[in-house]
């Protein structure tokens, strides 16, 4: 063997040993700390099936959850990084709310050059807190009430469209709701007239889908985050083409408004006011940069679109399979609307208690977010134990597993909105149900989402009855490789006009 070949062999073996040492450094992390755990494998930890994209994340976490019986929490390794899964609702409430100061970040690592990635969802402290404080007022009840007319008009457009096409009984509900929600979200957030219901090119919907699509890229970026924060910063969360598209969309709209002296009561305007106030401050005191402004408009459009599209389609899908529940909710909508002079208003939606229960139940069975996650920011002693969560450890709350745990819910697989009635909801254990998360990092758009969903669904159900058609599939598998747990398919349903 020549000297060069020998040196190369030594180099290769040294690299191999170094890699093995690095990849197994945390293999006994949980064992050493005497914390219950699932035995991990070198390099991939407990994530090999997820890395191969063979299973849905939320379903895999539900499997972990039931594998670890009679424990309040347990450890896994995401690759080589330790993560603690919490099963105990009491501890969940502490992490999200009471002891939030130990868990204020989600654990994402985003580079400053990843413009669309630097939004409220992914941002770390202290930037997150400053930005949240600046933007939270945009979602206040008063501001939402002032944008109600915009939502109202867009949901009327959907009903007009259905009426114009009443001969067409079968609808791919997910696509229909996706188009309707795009129009609503773009109008309510940016005042943009997208008309995706009528626009066959669907350019904007395609852009939104690109961001959330069940793509290997998105999933891989998300996973790299937990494997190597260093590498994660090198890979942008969203494709650059999306940045160009949304940057253009936002600033062209603002320029057009300035030129024509248009003022609206939409979220863009409200955020623009915050941005303009900031421009008066010295540069070092500004929070909302031009880039942050665009990335936050982007995340609001994206979050408002995907979550509401899926939740409204799944609600209609469940109601189609539960005609008794559908009749009950329609009866309520009709009665409240009659009492409000024949019109659905901001205040009348608040009176639709059963509709609220229906939505809560949809979000229990289909919680959308794969999980809620936090990073431990400071050593945390788990109350009542001698276990410690160390700084840098990921803490994960498996929402689907919690929402469907028979120990927490009676007949968890049954769609039953009555579990959220006034008398029954008192028995829901805090921490066992959190489709919007909880605590200071709770979904900022929760109120907007519920308003938008209730308005659209009440109008559809007032005018149309939904039922399964030949193409309907009762159960659809959850998408794999995705940041959200969304059932596959378009949810074909029959829409039949209701006699008024
Ligand atoms: C059915 C609808 C929706 C669901 C189920 C949902 C769910 C969630 C969940 C689970 C979180 C994480 C909360 C946590 O970690 O504690 C979240 C965060 C967030 N959501 Fe939503 N969401 C919905 C609609 C919306 C809408 C309409 C918007 C904006 C218009 C929005 C914007 C956001 C933002 C910006 C965050 C990050 C908040 C922060 O870290 O401060 N979401 N959402």
Image (cartoon, helix red, strand yellow):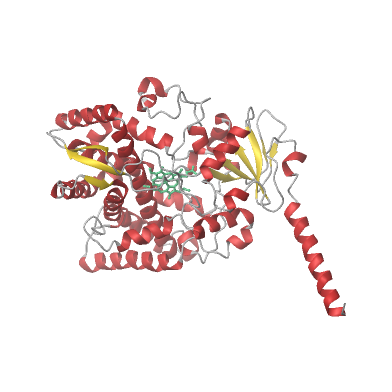
What is the residue that sits farthest to the front in this orientation? 470
Position of 260 with respect to 242 (left or right) is: left
Q: How many numbered discs sit on the rendered protein?
A: 0
- The picture quadrant where one finds residue 225 is bottom right
**Residue 186 is at least partly visible in this image:** yes
Judged left or right of residue 139, residue 233 is right
- The residue lying toward the viewer, choosing from 232 and 492, is 492
Q: Residue 454's x, y, as percent?
A: 28, 39
Residue at point 51%, 63% (across, down) = 236
In the image, taking residue 53 as reference, residue 380 lies left or right, namely: right
Quarter containing the C terminus: top left
The image shows residue 313, relative to residue 68, as above or below, that is: below
**Considering only vertical position in the picture, is 42 above or below 324?**
below
| Residue depicted at x 27% and y 26% | 324
Any part of residue 397 in sight: no
Picture quarter with the N terminus: bottom right
Judge by depth and name the residue closer to the eye, 304 or 383. 304
Query: Percent x, y for residue 18?
Result: 78, 61
Residue farthest along the top direction in this orientation? 423
């Amino acid at each position: 063997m020549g000297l060069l070949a020998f040196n190369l062999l030594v180099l290769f073996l040294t690299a191999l040993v170094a890699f093995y040492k690095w990849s197994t450094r945390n293999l006994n992390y949980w064992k050493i700390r005497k914390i219950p755990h699932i035995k991990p494998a070198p390099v991939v930890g407990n994530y090999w099936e997820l890395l191969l994209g063979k299973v849905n994340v939320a379903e895999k976490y539900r499997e972990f959850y039931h594998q670890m019986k009679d424990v309040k929490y347990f450890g896994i390794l995401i690759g080589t990084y330790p993560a603690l899964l919490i099963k105990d609702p009491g501890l969940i409430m502490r992490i999200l709310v009471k002891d939030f100061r130990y868990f204020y970040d989600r654990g994402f690592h985003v580079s400053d050059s990843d413009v669309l990635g630097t939004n409220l969802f992914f941002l770390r402290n202290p930037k997150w807190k400053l930005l949240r404080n600046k933007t939270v007022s945009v979602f206040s009840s008063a501001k939402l009430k002032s944008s109600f007319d915009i939502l109202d008009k867009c949901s009327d457009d959907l009903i007009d469209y259905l009426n114009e096409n009443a001969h067409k009984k079968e609808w791919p509900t997910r696509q229909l709701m996706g188009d309707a929600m795009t129009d609503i979200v773009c109008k309510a957030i940016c005042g943009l007239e997208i008309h995706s219901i009528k626009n066959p090119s669907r350019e904007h919907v395609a852009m939104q889908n690109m961001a959330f699509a069940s793509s290997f890229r998105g999933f891989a970026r998300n996973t790299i985050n937990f494997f190597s924060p260093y590498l994660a910063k090198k890979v942008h969360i969203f494709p650059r083409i999306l940045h160009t598209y949304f940057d253009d969309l936002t600033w062209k709209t603002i320029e057009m408004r300035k030129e024509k002296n248009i003022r609206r009561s939409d979220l863009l305007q409200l955020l623009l006011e915050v941005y303009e106030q900031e421009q008066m401050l010295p540069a070092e005191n500004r929070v909302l940069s031009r880039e942050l402004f665009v990335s936050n408009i982007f995340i609001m459009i994206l979050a408002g679109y995907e979550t509401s599209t899926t939740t409204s389609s799944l609600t209609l899908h469940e109601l189609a399979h539960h005609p008794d529940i559908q009749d009950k909710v329609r009866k309520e909508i009709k009665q409240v609307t009659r009492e409000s002079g024949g019109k659905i208003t901001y205040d009348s939606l608040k009176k639709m208690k059963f509709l609220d229960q229906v939505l809560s139940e949809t979000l229990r069975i289909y919680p959308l977010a794969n999980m809620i996650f936090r990073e431990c920011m400071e050593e945390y002693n788990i109350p009542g134990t001698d276990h410690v969560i160390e700084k840098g450890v990921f803490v994960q709350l498996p929402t689907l597993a919690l929402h469907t745990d028979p120990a927490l819910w009676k007949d968890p697989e049954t769609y039953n909105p009555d579990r959220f009635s006034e008398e029954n909801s008192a028995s829901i254990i805090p921490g066992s149900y959190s489709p919007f998360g909880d605590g200071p990092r709770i979904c900022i758009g929760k109120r907007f989402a519920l308003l938008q969903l209730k308005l659209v669904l009440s109008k559809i159900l007032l005018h149309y009855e939904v039922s399964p058609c030949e193409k309907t599939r009762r159960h659809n598998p959850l998408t794999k490789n995705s940041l959200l747990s969304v059932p596959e398919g378009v949810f074909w349903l029959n829409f039949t006009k209701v006699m008024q």
